[in-house]
Image: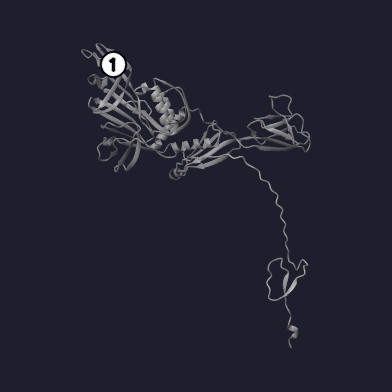
Amino acid sequence: MTIESTDRTAYIDWPSFTIENILNNQVDTCSFVTKKYGDRTWKPRAGDEIEITDGLSTIFAGVIIEVEEETDALLIRYRVECKDWTHYLDRSLVVESYKDKTVNEIIDHINDNYLSGFTITNVDCDIFVTSITFNRIPVSQCLQILAEKTNYSWYIDYDKDIHFFAKNSETSPFDLTDENGKYIFSSLKITEDISQIRNKIYVRGGEAEATSRDDNFVGDGTKKTFALSYKFASKPTVTVGGASKTVGIDFLDTSGYDCYWNYNEKYIRFDTAPASSAAIVVSGNPLYPILIQVQDDVSIAEYGTYEFSLIDKAIKSNDEARLYGYSQLTAYANNIKEGSFQTYESGLRSGQAINIQSTVRGTNESFLIQRVNLQMRGPNDGLWTVELATLRTLGIIDFLQKLLMAYDRMGAIAESEIVTLEMSRTDQQTVDVTESITKKTPNADTQTANCTESISKDPLGAGVAPDWVLAPYVPSGHTDTKREMLLDYSSYLY
């Protein structure tokens, strides 16, 4: 351990020493205790830079952010808390707008203008961002927003280099097998859980606006109020007998209108009853409640059907509801696996993919490292504890983290409401589509065609005189009046 470039290894109370490395964008921390007594006069200070190495590998680097002092007679004990280089990353607030830039270009600009001493060697994302604005937010938050928009991951390594990469694309320096001796064999634990499965999900959203519809009525000379079939999105138009009527808002507009519209109660009220037999037409864009069903047939075939219902009134289209349902299926449609093991080998860090191939356990599967914790028992005796999760488990973790920041989505549907259910099933494919559309103005082409037809139906029966011809003869068509003339020779027989 070096602090401000000076070796302080001998001052550390090693049983108190821990390093915690958490998944990707989470901050890595280090803590330890050091003592001051006799000729041991060194005192750690907040703001000092710290680096910890294992051989030639750096296993932690950052800044001391807190020093807690305790006194016991002539002994002074310092409890030290450290944070990785994210502490420096967030000293500046970004105020920028970017249009039609790749993530690589955005991070490069932030690094040049807001950071000092950082590099971007491991930033690899050429996805275009149409438009994004950062309004006085820390650099780490900017990176996290970009990661969420592109479904990428990021972290700062101990050499102050920013890593921005496709999820699950970094691999561990070693995998686990029954024979390779890279871990304490008896420490490996794997847990499988199906308690959270949801593979058929109903998503109830808010209300969407449909295309224009007409509500038709007939006046009787006395009726003034007409119940509408639809809840219109905005004030409708009204005609009576083809004549347009002025429309006000009921209870808001009190006079000066021919009729009044009530949004919640869904009716039109006239000041003067329309005449008997008068055609009344109310036109507008009705609102309809959004209800989407999505399901994962593969999960249903394996585990049976597990239904779940969600309500989010902020959803304003079927597409939004469908995407929300699919995000739930991604997280909950399958079983989850979590695991952990202990090792004396360094080099593992969160975000790396590690494969476990064990004949004894009947497992051959890749996991993602979620957390790495180092507990030291001496300056050369450390034990690493590694926590794992399958990729679908991590989908649940990401989803729950976002859900914690959202408002309550639960609610109820009134019994009187009529809703239309749209059902979707998952298709396990990824498709990238680019579409170019040129909008043309439609032109009407109206033509009039006149057709005449002459048909002879049964010429003989219609009284048309046939033309008699000698046999044999075959008529050429249904309008051919020629017929065979047959002679009766029976009278000439003797």
* Quadrant placement of the N terminus: top left
Question: In terms of depth relative to the viewer, which is nearer, 83 or 146?
Answer: 146
Identify which residue is drawn at 31% across, 28% down: 373
Seen as rendered, the residue at the extreme left is: 39
Picture coordinates of residue 295 (x, y %)?
49, 41
The residue indicated by pointer 1 is 44
Q: Position of residue 38 (x, y in %)?
A: 21, 12
Where, by quadrant of the figure, is residue 349 drawn?
Answer: top left
Residue beneath the point at 41% across and 29% down: 105
Q: Is residue 338 visible?
A: no
Q: 253 or 415, which is in the foreground?
A: 253
Above or below — where is 16 with respect to 152?
above
Residue 242 relative to residue 331: left or right:
right
Residue drawn 69% across the image and 70% down it: 475
Q: Nearer the viewer, residue 294 or 310?
A: 294
Q: Nearer the viewer, residue 480 or 67?
A: 480
